[in-house]
Image (tube, grey):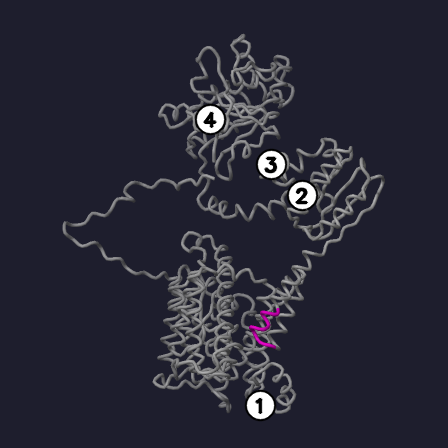
Amino acid sequence: MTAFAPTDTPDSAHEPRAHKPHAPPPAKRFRIAGADVSASIAVFLIALPLSLGIALATGAPLQAGLVAAAVGGLVAGRLGGSALQVSGPAAGLTVVTADIIQRYGWRTTCAITVLVGLAQLGLGCLRVARSALAVSPAVVHGMLAGIGVTIAMAQLHIVLGGTPQSAVLDNLRALPAQLATLHPAALSISLLTLVVLLLWPRIPGRAGRMTRVLPAALVSVAVATCFASVTRLNLDRVDLPSWRSHALAGLPEGPALGIVTAVLTTTLVCSVQSLLGAVAIDKLTSQRPELNTSVRRSDLDRELLGQGGANIVSGALGGLPVAGVAVRSVANVRAGAVSRNSTMLHGVWVVVAALLLVPALELIPLAALAALVMAVGIQMVSLNHIRTITRHREIVVYATTTLGVVVLGVLEGVALGIAVAVTVALHRLARTRITHEKVAGVHHVRVRGQLTFLAVPRLSRTLHLVPQGEDVVVELDGSFMDHAAFESLQCWQDAHAAHGGSVEVTGRAGTRIAEPASAAHSCCRPWTPWRNHHCDRPQEERRTGEPRGHQLASGISAFQRNTAPHVRGELARLAREGQQPAQLFLTCADSRVVTSMITSSGPGDLFVVRNVGNLVPLPGAESGDDSVGAAIEYAVDVLKVRSITVCGHSGCGAMQALLSIPQGDARTPLWRWLRHGRPSLERVAAQGEDWARLAGQAPADPVEQLCLTNVIQQLEHLRAHESVARRLATGDLELHGMYFHVGEAQAYLLTEGSGVGKPPYEVFDQVAPTRLGSKRAAAPQP
């Protein structure tokens, strides 16, 4: 499809600025958009309390959360492949990191984070990022749900004023004892935090719109902190030791197998979460048309490299592992960010807060952070994801992964989920039900499920139960058929037809399915839905079949499902830039003339005008309808088309009517409109035997003779329009005549030199693939 150039700009816009002799070129200024500044502040206000809360949940030094947030913003934001994704300490890493810290200590955890970064760099260099997206969404969401349950159970003990255990089952066993020994102060602060967190986004009216400028996470922690300070409650609070005593990475200490397992687990969770987050941000970005030109789609391999670099720096500086964080990324996009500067600025604000706001941060109660992180963990168990997965019949995979992560651990749970997902896929592929019954003299063979080579023996046995010469309907209720199954079905179908039987292969609900590429008429494959609805169906069946409304809804549904995803980007570009067609294509309203098909054109390529008989009324003619003239004027003067094509076709009903209309008869709008075709009748009579020719041959009958002559006559009418004549005089507009033979599916073009005053007659030459490069008038191309 042709990509049309944008509207020309004045030459002065492309001329370099004049400089004084020997003067240095002007220095480039680094500018940050105001939208990025405001978005970075919004993300910072969310990231600050969450980073402290995640550090608390993992058992790491609280500064480690701030280090990871700053490095995620500055390093991953600068090097990553997703411009608007915000990275930092992620809730999805909490369980993994907490387990590593408990087993190997903090300094070894930092070293493992560095190794994770090196592993991600290696994966990025190998360009395997896309393969991570092959993991079933049920496994990914099950992993996140399992991590969320683990986080929520651990933080519940802190909310109640106790200390969490290392495993979920241990936390469940200790919960009754913890409920018996509640800490009222911690519980009150936690409940206050949760109430504010829940109600803040739901404040109605104008006040709600104004208050939602501040994120609920920040407001809930701030309210709880103020309440605890005013009431002087005895609570554990944030303790940020001096940065001089901050622990950095050390050499890994522990069993080699355990270290390797920790690195693989953390790499898996970090990478999958970051890549899926980048894909999700691309979807959000596509909903903001103003970003389609300034923000590119995510480069997933570069995103892995950026995450790897961030983990190396974070681990070396004593920070938590870094990954893409969905909450902050979504807030970044919705706050209006337009570039990666917002992500990097948020990292700068975290550094400033870590250095200058230590006294304020140390007022925050740990119970408030625990409540915040517990709410995040609960939100990771998404009901919307569960509904979607249930609809796709993968709830077993989701539940297995979730339970595996909760009971066994992240890596073991993911491995178990992948194994179950593969088993389910193989079961679906192999489970095929084939039945045979005879109803009203017609044999019905129904295939339920995917038709693969595994089902070929059963399919063959069932098909051979049908006697020769009988009528058969084969109904395929599945979305996949491999080559072995197709070949078996095709061979039987050919053999059955050779013995006098008839075979109809249908899809779900009895709709005819498309022929495969190797079948007849394979050249029509781009129009297989159209072909199956019309060309292959007898006219009587179309009259007595489904109602038109059903066909319309079915066609629209098929477009939305199959075609819209492929053309959405191009149509979005046309919506932004406006239409810029190269040609005006004037043809008949006949339903058999499919302009996009016979010209291989797409959206935005042709400005099409259709009417009965492809007529061009002369300027000033008493037609009572100036629509054709208006369309010509708009296309020539406003759209600046470079050519106009008049296309006639065989078997034109308008031309047949012209031959039978009595002179002076103008009883109906149709007859009054067809008066504009009478000059074509007069031209045929004046030519005598000098008729227009079709590929050198005389027309087959008077109707075809009039159809060909009408194209030439309408080209002459076009020249009479002022706008067309003016552009023709300047040489920047061309006129073409075209004839489409419906029965032969063949296009013909009026050759150069033919037309008004060009003896002895006009010739329409056949357009063949081997002649597209000739100097004849080219057919309209996209």
- On screen, residue 48 versus residue 537, left or right, reads left
| Residue located beneath label 2 in the image | 487
Residue under label 3, please give it: 522
Q: Quadrant of residue 670?
A: top right
Residue nearest the viewer, comparing 129 with 373: 129
Write down the quadrant of residue 499 in the picture. Answer: top right
What's the amino acid at mark 2?
Glu
Q: Earlier in the sequence, mark 3 or mark 1?
A: 1
Q: Residue at x 46, y 26 (%)?
A: 771
Find disc 1 in the rendering and name its residue: 183
Whether 147 is among the magenta residues is no
Q: Gap between marks 3 and 1, in whole Å?
A: 75 Å
Whether residue 633 can be seen here: yes
**CA distance separating discs 3 and 2:** 16 Å
Q: Residues within 10 Å of mark 4 (few under 14, many from 20)?
A: few
Within 10 Å of disc 1 (Cα), the crowding (few <14, some 14-19, many 20+) is some
Q: Secondary structure at mark 1?
A: loop
- Kindly report the distance in space between the C-alpha atoms of the residues bearing marks 1 and 2: 73 Å
Q: Which residues are magenta?
A: 408-416
Percent from the top left, x then y, of residue 476? 72, 47
* Sequence-wise first label, 3 or 4: 3
Q: Depth-wise, is mark 1 or mark 2 nearer the camera? A: 2
Amino acid type shown at disc 4? Arg
Q: Which of 359 and 688 lies nearest the eye of the viewer?
A: 688
For disc 4, the marked residue is 771
Q: What amino acid type is highlighted by mark number 1?
A: His
Foreground residue among 131 and 350:
131
Nearer to us of marks 4 and 1 is 4
Q: Disc 3 vs disc 2: which is toward the camera?
A: 2
Marks 3 and 4 in Cβ contact (< 8 Å): no
